Image (cartoon, rainbow, N blue to C red):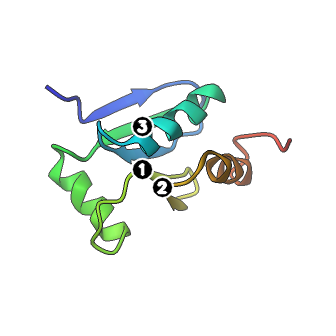
Amino acid sequence: MRTPHVTVRMSEARLTIYTTEWCGDCRLARRVLDKHGIGYDLIDITDDAKARRYVEEINGGYRSVPTIVLPSSRVIVEPSALQLEAALRGEGLLKAS
């Protein structure tokens, strides 16, 4: 049985990752966040119809994952590790390197 919503607590700033179990890009995003100690809410859209509709709404009808909603409400979709780190810097969650 899948757990559709998991919270990983590492920092006070929260972001949400909409994901699926089979998604390699989702695992990459989680590794980046874990590496930097950034907490997140993880929502698997596989068995969560409401979350799936939300992702489709954000992405023009597509179930693109990972869809990441940052604390500022900015949304990034299928980012590379470098793109995700840049977005985290823009949110003040990562120090500039």
Instruction: Identify residue for label 3.
Output: 41
Name the residue located 41 percent from the left edge and 40 percent from the top edge: 24
Inter-mark Cα distance, 2 to 3: 17 Å
Q: Residue furthest right?
A: 97
Give residue 90's position: percent from left, percent from top: 72, 54
Instruction: Work out whether mark 2 precedes mark 3 in sequence or the reverse, and give the earlier one.
Output: 3
- Residue 22 % position (x, y): 30, 39
Three-letter amino acid code at the position of disc 2: Glu
Residue placed under numbered mark 2 in the picture: 78
Q: Label 1 to label 2, Cα distance in Å?
A: 5 Å
Q: Nearer the viewer, residue 28 or 76?
A: 28
**Between marks 2 and 3 in the image, the one whose residue lies nearer the viewer:** 2
* Residue 74 image offset from top left, x and y in percent: 55, 61
Q: What residue do we see at 58% from left, 34% from top? A: 33
Tag 1 residue: 66
Residue shown at the point (73%, 46%) measured from the top left: 92
Of all residues, the one furthest to the bottom in this rendering is: 60
Q: Earlier in the sequence, mark 1 or mark 2?
A: 1
Given this view, does label 3 or label 1 mark the residue nearer the observer?
1
> What distance separates the C-alpha of mark 3 from that of mark 1?
12 Å
CB within 8 Å, label 1 to label 2: yes
Which amino acid, mark 1? Pro
Q: Dividing the picture into quarters, in which one does residue 11 lie?
A: top right
